[in-house]
Amino acid sequence: MSDFHLDRGQVRRNFGRAARTYEQHDALQREVQQSLLDRLGFYLETPERVLDVGAGTGRGTALLKQRYAKAEVIAVDLALPMLRAAKAHSGWLKPFRRVCAEATALPFPDHRVDVLHSNLCFQWITDLAALFGECARVLKPGGLLAFTTFGPDTLKELRAAWAAVDGHSHVSRFLDMHDIGDAVLNAGLRDPVLDVERYTLTYSEPRKLLEELRGLGATHADAARERHLTGKSHYRAMLAAYEAMRVDGRIPATWEVVTAHAWGPPPGQSRRLPGGGEMASFSLSSLKGSRRR
């Protein structure tokens, strides 16, 4: 994991540029969203505050507002153009708030969130300690974290096609489910459950997949990527390598999706710090009367 870093500025730019085209290409995201909504059935309380982290254009946020009509539902995204587009899904009768912020620095007080939902966002964050530390910080004790993220087999065909051409990084990498699970536990979140499912989408030609990735903003953002333009000969060679993978006349693209949920830790439960050691937090009210007089 130490050599795996994403360029956060590039991620923000990619998704900002894709705000106008995202919903033309988000069929997989909507399919995965439905399975994630099923996870919310584990939460049996009536939430007061719900966060949608990595909300994008707000389709999922609107579904959360429909489900939790009386809750304060907040769309959080690092790309301001995405949040502007999300306004179209925030209806007059069922509006939701929009906040531009990083998932690793949520601008919300400790232990004030009942449900933290995130659909296919966390794969764009490599500082898992900071990410899940923030989730544990803002969740109420017993609050629900439910999220999906891409696993390392995602776009394995495209990655293999580029690997047949050169040894450079052309496709973003994604973390293994075990790394994610470890980070969830290290943050102090309780009883995580993670599942993996693979989706295979097919295209008439490789260029159609590449157009979809650009339309979603899901283009290469690895900090180790080559910064110069890829030559036409390299590009054509990659397309030829991908063409050799046709199945039943179609170009396949694998998407490995990790779906997970966990629970906010009880007050005072310690969590591991990135540099070693542990930290526990208590509410001020719980400490009343504990000082010696």
Image (spheres, helix red, strand yellow):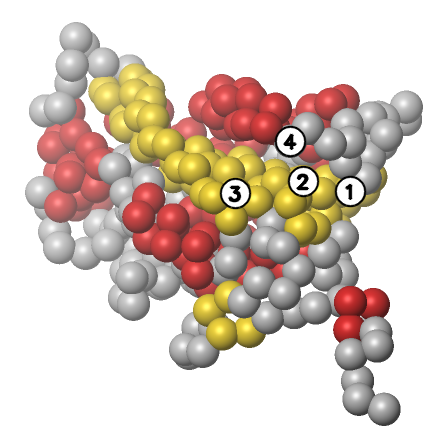
Q: Residue at x 64, y 45 (%)?
A: 142
Between disc 1 and disc 3, the foreground one is 3
**Residues at circles 2 and 1 in contact by the CB criterion of under 8 Å:** yes
**Residues at circles 1 and 3 in contact by the CB criterion of under 8 Å:** no
Q: Quadrant of residue 53?
A: top right
Q: Is residue 85 visible?
A: no
Distance (Cα) linking label 1 and label 3: 17 Å
Residue 262, numbered circle: 3
Q: Residue 152 location in percent, x, y?
A: 28, 43
Of mark 2 and mark 1, the one earlier in the sequence is: 1
Of mark 4 and mark 3, the one earlier in the sequence is: 4
In the image, farthest residue toward the bottom: 293
Secondary structure of residue under mark 1: strand
Tell whether 14 sits left or right of 233.
Answer: right
Of mark 2 and mark 3, the one earlier in the sequence is: 2
Distance (Cα) linking label 4 and label 3: 11 Å
Distance (Cα) linking label 2 and label 3: 10 Å
Residue toward you, 160 or 120:
120
Q: Considering only vertical position in the picture, is 200 above or below 103?
A: above
Q: Which residue is mark 2?
A: 115
Identity, as a three-letter code, of the amino acid under mark 3 = Ala
Identity, as a three-letter code, of the amino acid under mark 4 = Tyr
Distance (Cα) linking label 1 and label 4: 13 Å
Q: Considering only vertical position in the picture, is 2 above or below 15?
A: below
Q: Which residue is mark 1?
A: 49
Residue toward you, 163 or 111:
111
In the image, farthest residue toward the front: 293
